Image (cartoon, grey):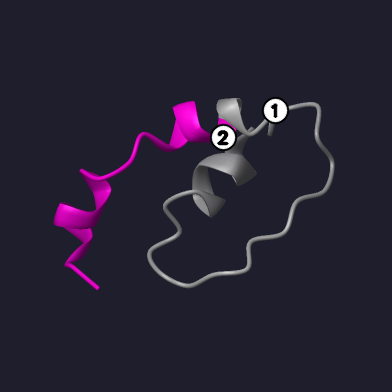
Amino acid sequence: MPDEEMWQGFFDPDRVLTLLGLTAGMSNAVDFGCGYGTFTIPAAHD
């Protein structure tokens, strides 16, 4: 896995979460993965 700084440049987490339909109105979501929390942390802030 690349270092965190490089990894962060690969994705736009807010855009990906929106495209997946994960919005602030969601009450439950599961992250089956590992890494730096690229999607989990932004999802938890909504």
Q: Residue 12: image x %, image y %? A: 36, 34
- The answer to whether the residues at label 2 and label 1 have Cβ atoms under 8 Å apart is yes
How busy is the neighbourhood of tag 1: few (under 14 within 10 Å), some, or many (20 plus)? few
Relative placement, left or right, of 8 versus 19 is left
Which residue corresponds to the image point at 17% horizontal and 67% vertical from the top-left? 3
Q: Is residue 21 magenta?
A: no
Q: Residue furthest front?
A: 19
Picture disc at residue 6: none
Say what secondary structure mark 1 lies in: loop
Question: From mark 2 to mark 1, how far is it between C-alphas?
Answer: 7 Å
Which residue corresponds to the image point at 63% horizontal and 34% vertical from the top-left? 20
Looking at the rendered image, the quarter that the N terminus falls into is bottom left
Q: Residue 34: image x %, image y %? A: 47, 72
Picture disc at residue 23: 1
Which residue corresponds to the image point at 75% horizontal and 51% vertical from the top-left? 29
| Circle 1: residue type | Thr
How busy is the neighbourhood of tag 2: few (under 14 within 10 Å), some, or many (20 plus)? some
Which residue corresponds to the image point at 60% horizontal and 42% vertical from the top-left? 43
Relative placement, left or right, of 29 versus 1 is right
- Locate residue 19: give its quadrant: top right
| Circle 2: residue type | Leu
From what the image shows, is residue 27 above or below residue 4? above
Relative placement, left or right, of 1 versus 15 is left
Total marks shown come to 2
- Residues in magenta? 1-17
Instruction: Please give the residue where the numbered disc 2 appears in the rendered image.
Output: 17
